[in-house]
Image (cartoon, helix red, strand yellow):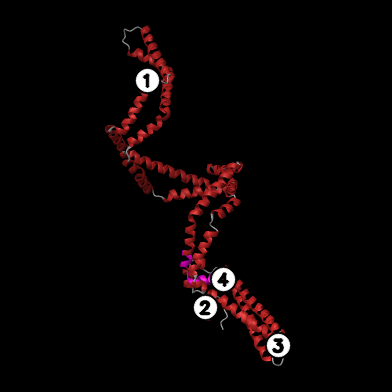
Amino acid sequence: MQTGSSAPPVTPPAAEADLPPALRITADDELKRQRLVSMKRIATGMLVVVAALFIVSRLLEPRYPWLSWVRAFAEAAMVGGIADWFAVTALFRHPLGIPIPHTAIVPARKDRIGTALGNFVQRNFLQREVVADKLAAMKLGERAARWLAEPENSRRLARHVATGLAGAVNVLRDEDVQAVADKAVVRRLRTVQVAPLLARGFEVLTAGGRHQSLLDDALRLAARFIAENDDAIRDRIKQESPWWVPGLVENKLHDRIVTGVENTLAAVAADPDHPLRVRYDEAVQRFVESLRTSPEVIAKAESLKLELLEHPSVGEFSREVWGDLKGRITRYAERLTDEEQAEPDAIERWVNGLGKTVLADPALTAKVDQWVLELVTYAVEHARGEVSQLIATTVAQWDANATSRKIELQIGRDLQFIRINGTLVGGLVGLLLHALAAAF
C-alpha cells in the first residue's frame, strides 16, 4: 500500500521553468519539502508499527489473553491511521493512484478554490471599513512626513527624481519632441480660432472693472512721463515753433500744453464717471464684440495667427526651449548626484521643508492622513472586484498538479499530525470499546 510517505510529484525541469513565479520551488520550499517527507515517514512508521502490533497480538492472543487489549488498541489505531491517511492524501492526489470519486480535491477544484479565495479576500479584506481602520492606525501621512524630514531621505528622493528626469529627457530624441510639440501645440493652434479666445480673454480682463485699473496705471505712467520729460517737451516746442515766435510765447505755450495735459490726466484719474473713461469702456466693449462677431476682424486675427505659426522663428524657438530645458535638467542631475556635494539642493530643501511643515502643523498632518486614507480607500473600493477577478483568473491559469504540490508544501507537514493523532486517538477509542465489551 502506497502510504504517501514520498515527496510530492516533482515537475520536470523544463516544466518548472515554464511555471509562474508563484508556483516555482524556492529554497524555502525545498526546506519545507524535506520537513514534509520527514513527517510523512513518522506518520507512516506509526501506522506500520500498529499494524505489526496488531498481527503479533492477534497471533499470540490465544496463549496470552491479556494481549486482547493490545490487539484492540492496535486494530483501532490501524483503522484510524489508514482512514486519516486516505483523507489527507485525497486532498492532493488519488490515493494509490486509483481515481476514486471526490479525491484529488485540490487539482480537481483548483478553479473553484481560486474563485472562492478571490471572493474571500474581496469580502473580508478589501472592505472600506477594514482598510480605513488599518490606515488610520498606521498614520501614513505622518510617517511619510517624518521620512521626508530626514535629510538623508530627502536627498535620496531628490536624487531619484533628478536621475529619472535626466534619463527621460536624454532618452527622448529631439526630433520626436519637436514632432510632438508641433502636433500637440502648433497643429492644435492652427485649428482653433484665435479671435473668440482673445474675446474671452478681454472679457476676463474687463470683468469687475479691471480694465479701468489698467487705465489708472496708464494715466499715472503718462503723468510721470510728462513730469520727467518737461525739458524735452519745452525743447520740442521751441524746435517746432516758427523763428519769429518770441521765447515768452513759447514758454506760455509749453505751460498751457503741459498743464492742460496734466489737468486732464488728473481729472480722468479722479473721476470714475469721466467721459474719457466712458469712451474707453465703450471702445473696449466694441473691440471685444468685433472679435466675437465681425468676420473681418476674425479673418484678420486668423491671418496674423497663421503668419506667426508659419514663421521659422516659432520652430527655432521651440527647439531652443527644449535644448535649454534638456541641458538644465542634465546639468542639474549631475550636480545633484555628486556624492561630494555638501550643500542641499533646492529640491532637497523643498522636500525636507515639506516634511517638517507637515509635522509642525497637527491640523495639516491630520489632513494629509485623511487624504491618504480617502485616496487608498477610494482605490480599494473601486478595485475590489478586479482584485477578486485577478485572483480567480490567476489561479485558473496555474497548472493543477503544480498548484497542488505548492499547497501541500505549505500545509502538508501540519496535515501529517492529523494522521498521527488519528492513529493515537483510534487506538484509545479501541481500548475504550474493548473495556466496555469486557465490562458488559
- Label placed on residue 354: none
Any part of residue 81 in sight: yes
In the displayed structure, 48 sits above or below 300; it is: below
Give the mark nearer the N terminus: 1 vs 2. 2
Q: Is residue 77 magenta?
A: no
Along the horizontal axis of the image, is 58 left or right of 125?
Answer: right
Q: Main secondary structure of the magenta part?
A: helix
What label sits on residue 94 in the rendered view?
2
| Disc 3 target residue | 67
| Kind of residue at badge 1 | Leu
Q: Where on the picture, by quarter, is residue 76?
A: bottom right
Q: Name which of mark 4 and mark 3 comes first in the sequence.
A: 3
**Residue 62 point in image, percent of width and height:** 69, 92
Kindly identify which numbered label has been placed on residue 409.
Answer: 4
Q: Secondary structure at mark 2?
A: loop
**Quarter of the image where the C terminus is located:** bottom right
Do tag 1 and tag 3 residues touch (Cβ < 8 Å)? Answer: no
